[in-house]
């Protein structure tokens, strides 16, 4: 069975919204991102992330992510038609949780959830997420949407923890069931 892998950039106080306010990059974080995306052949995005990313990534040359996100199959959780074209993008018909459960049963690689807080929260609440891959910045955001707010108690097992040269923490968790 395929795995659903949530990859999020967080501030030290748990904010996932607008990570450009608090996040920086270094070679360790680039290598980590490459490792995360190399096993994924599908991505589920929320409407807001899709709209922001469809305006940026098609013309970006920030590898390895731009090549990955432009080429991968993207499924978009939205109740409205997409107003932007972006290669390999499909609107999810029906319920997100039912769709994700079905997608996990199909053959293929991992299914990524990137930057889409509401999607990640819905899939975590439905116990469909298999791995949580977090990169925590050494800065607080003070305010903004937090990834784990409003979720039922869940146990995670730390699989890997690495500090980058710029003080970011790379934390990989499997969801304990």
Image: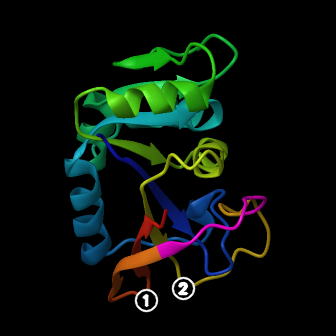
Residue 152 lies within the magenta run: yes
Q: In the image, residue 157 lies at what x, y percent?
A: 44, 76
Q: Position of residue 108 (x, y in %)?
A: 22, 32
**75 sits left or right of 79 in the view:** left
Q: Secondary structure at mark 1?
A: loop
Q: Which residue is mark 2?
A: 138
User: Is 64 displayed left or right of 50 in the figure?
Assistant: left
**Residue 131 position (above or below residue 123):** below
| Residue 168 image point, x, y percent | 44, 82
**Depicted 112 relative to depicted 155: above or below:** above
Who is closer to the viewer here, 15 or 156?
156
Residue at point 23%, 39% (across, down):
109
Q: Which residues make up the magenta segment? A: 149-156
Q: In this view of the protein, which residue sits in the foreground, 153 or 117?
A: 153
Dot 2, how many residues are within 10 Å of its Cα: few (below 14), some (14-19), or many (20+)? Answer: some
Using the rendered view, name the quadrant where residue 21 is placed.
bottom right
Q: Residues within 10 Å of mark 1 (few under 14, many from 20)?
A: some
104, above or below 4, in the image? above
- Which residue is identified by label 1? 167
> Label 2's element?
loop
Confirm whether residue 62 shows in the render: no
Q: Which mark is residue 134?
A: none
> Alpha carbon of mark 2 to alpha carbon of mark 1: how far?
6 Å
User: Which colour style is shown?
Assistant: rainbow
Q: Residue at x 59, y 32 (%)?
A: 97
Quarter where residue 11 is shown: bottom right
| Residue contact between numbered discs 2 and 1, judged by CB atoms under 8 Å | yes
Question: Who's the residue at 45% across and 71% down the image?
Answer: 135
Residue drawn at x 56%, y 50% is 127
Locate residue 51: give its quadrant.
top right
């Amino acid at each position: 069975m395929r795995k659903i892998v949530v990859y999020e950039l967080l501030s030290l106080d748990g904010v996932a919204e607008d990570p450009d306010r608090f996040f920086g990059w270094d070679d360790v974080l680039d290598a980590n991102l490459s490792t995360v995306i190399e096993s994924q052949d599908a991505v589920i995005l929320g409407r807001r992330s899709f709209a922001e990313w469809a305006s940026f990534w098609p013309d970006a040359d920030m590898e390895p992510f731009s090549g990955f996100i432009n080429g991968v199959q993207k499924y978009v959780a939205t109740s409205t038609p997409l107003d932007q074209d972006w290669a390999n993008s499909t609107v999810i018909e029906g319920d997100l949780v039912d769709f994700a459960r079905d997608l996990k049963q199909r053959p293929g690689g991992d299914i990524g959830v990137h930057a889409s807080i509401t999607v990640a929260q819905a899939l975590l609440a439905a116990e469909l997420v298999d791995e949580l891959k977090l990169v925590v910045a050494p800065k607080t955001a003070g305010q903004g949407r937090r990834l784990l707010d409003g979720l039922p108690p869940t146990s995670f097992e730390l699989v890997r923890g690495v500090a980058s040269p710029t003080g970011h923490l790379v934390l990989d968790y499997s969801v304990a069931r």
